[in-house]
Image: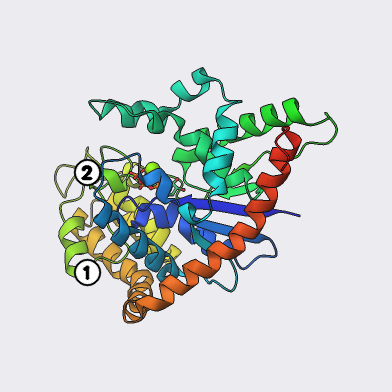
Amino acid sequence: MSRIFSGIQPSGELHIGNYLGAVQNWVRLQEGPDRSFFCVVDLHALTGNYDPADLRQRRHDMALTLLAAGLDPDRCTLFFQSAVRAHAELGWVFNTVTPLGDLERQVQFKDKSARQESVITGLLTYPVLQAADILLYRADRVPVGEDQVQHLELSRDIARKWNAKFRPEDSPYFPEPQALLTPVRRLMGLDGQAKMSKSLGNTIGLLEAPDDIWAKLRPAVTDPARVRKTDPGNPDVCNIYSMHKAFSPEPVQAEVRENCSGAKWGCIDCKKTLFTHMEETLVPIRTRAAQLQEKPGTVREIMVQGAERARAVAERTIGEVYDMMGLAH
Ligand code: ATP
Ligand code: MG
């Protein structure tokens, strides 16, 4: 039996990097035969600065956007992490088998802690809770963007260490979860400086209004070596072209490549074409979001039911884990 798990923080609005790197894959995978669990990881969002009233709204908005993007509560289990207490419990258990050095060398910890004056412990132990999120469902496949690959490696180490300590060698309890990547494994932000990230403000939101998207696309960074329209561009280093690869049909991609490298189109022409094809993906998502916005009770109800289903699996795991660790009740 295979199980799929993935999560997203309600630390801001769902952006096209999240969508192309992860969420689009979630929508595809829920159609398959394996049971899938998708989680709005609100406990992780506590590691950034936030206002409780904002978080309340952002959790709801994230759930709504995921449903608008195509998650179907009849095909997957969608829930809030904090509604299933066992996440925090298994996170603590895994803290007791994780070497400190393994956490200190995580690139995301180094990046995020460098941006903060005073670094909280939660930022360091975040990947331990993430291992618990996945392994609570004993999931072996995790659809994520490339920035999570190192954390997944740590999840495998944690599973291995826990199994080695509490299980006979020939009978591991936790699987070693593998990352599932999409072709767009890492979309850069519009400034071309860092990966597109909710917390960096360099994003295009999945539900943004068309005018706002265009206002952001227009000045977005392209091939830095292409200064004038008459300079030939290199699509392979251009962030706009990487979006074409995700949103535009293949013949359009070929046309863009030829006109860019042949210096026939300016970057603005290329962006206009991209915008048109992005809209083909985004219009139906926006429409579904508008329908859900009219009935806020629906989202709430879906999340309550999702948590119930998730809890049934999670309670069983944490019960068995406590039992094997000498904490039977
Ligand atoms: P934050 O800045 O708060 O960490 P984020 O944008 O990195 O937000 P997460 O909630 O951390 O979003 O990640 C959700 C999923 O989206 C993860 O699977 C992550 O790998 C993926 N993801 C995030 N950013 C990108 C990106 N720029 N390109 C591809 N995938 C991404
Ligand atoms: Mg992130």
Residue at 62 percent of width and 42 percent of height: 178
| Residue 175 visible in the picture | no
Q: Which mark is residue 191?
A: 2
* In this view, 239 is above or below 72: above
Q: Is residue 319 left or right of residue 194?
A: right
Q: Residue furthest front?
A: 329
Give the answer, above or below, for where 142 lies relative to 308.
above
Q: Quadrant of ligand 2?
A: top left
In which quadrant of the rendered image does the N terminus lie?
bottom right
Left or right for 231, reference 107 = left
Residue 56, given in percent of the width and then of the height, sits at 31, 59
Taking 264 as reference, is 302 above or below it? Answer: below
Quadrant location, the C terminus: top right
Q: Which mark, residue 31?
A: none
Residue located at (32% from left, 77% from top): 293
Asked whether 221 or 159 is in front, the reply is 159
Q: Is residue 76 visible?
A: yes
Inter-mark Cα distance, 2 to 1: 20 Å
Q: Position of residue 108 (x, y in %)?
A: 40, 32
Q: How many marks?
A: 2
Of badges 2 and 1, nearer the viewer stands 1
Say what secondary structure mark 2 lies in: loop
- Per the image, label 1 sits on a secondary structure element best described as loop
Amino acid on which disc 2 is placed = Asp
